[in-house]
Image (cartoon, rainbow, N blue to C red):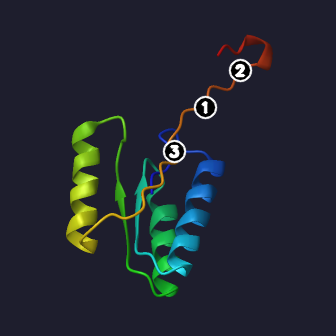
Amino acid sequence: MVGAREPSEYGRKMAARLGLELARGGANVMLCYAGNEEAALDTAAACEALGAKAAAMRCDVSKTDEVKALVDAALQQFGAVHILVNNAGIIKRIPMTEMTA
C-alpha cells in the first residue's frame, strides 16, 4: 500500500482502512509511508492483531530506487505481491476557479 507523497489526514486514514480491510480478508500487508512513521506502524500492528503479517517502510514513490527497495522488502517478507494499492497523490489547494485539466 502506498501513502500520500504529501501526507494528509485523508490519505493516511484511507491507507489505514484499506490495509485493515485487506488484513481482515486474509492478506498480508506492506505499508509504505512518506512521513508519518507512527501512523504506519500503528496500522501495521492493527493488521497483525487481525492475524495478518504486516510491515511498514518509508518510501518516496517519486524515486525509483526507493520503490524497488520497497518491492524487494515485500517480496523478501511475503514471497509475492498479489495486490497493489496505489494511494499516492499530490493535492494543490487552490480555488476551484483556478484549476485546469
Quadrant in which the C terminus appears: top right
Residue 4 numbered tag: 3
Number of other residues with Cα within 10 Å of mark 3, as a class: few under 14, some 14 to 19, many 20 or more: many
Residue that badge 2 annotates = 94
Judging from the image, what secondary structure is the residue with disc 1 in?
loop
Closest to the observer: 70 or 9?
70
User: Which of marks 3 and 2 precedes in the sequence?
Assistant: 3
Picture coordinates of residue 25, whole percent (x, y): 54, 79
User: Which of marks 3 and 1 precedes in the sequence?
Assistant: 3
Q: Amino acid at mark 2?
A: Ile
Q: Are marks 1 and 2 in contact (CB under 8 Å)?
A: no
Quadrant in which the N terminus appears: bottom left
**Residue 16 lies in quadrant:** bottom right
Residue at horizontal 47%, vertical 48%? 86
Residue 39 versus residue 96 in the image, above or below: below
Closest to the observer: 27 or 55?
27
Residue that badge 1 annotates = 91
Judging from the image, what secondary structure is the residue with disc 2 in?
loop
Picture coordinates of residue 83, whole percent (x, y): 42, 61
Query: Is 41 left, or right, of 79 in this rendering?
Result: right
Residue 4 versus residue 80 in the image, above or below: above
Residue at horizontal 57%, vertical 64%? 18
Q: Number of callouts in the render? A: 3
Residue 24 versus residue 65 in the image, above or below: below
Q: Amino acid at mark 1?
A: Ile
Residue at horizontal 40%, vertical 75%? 28
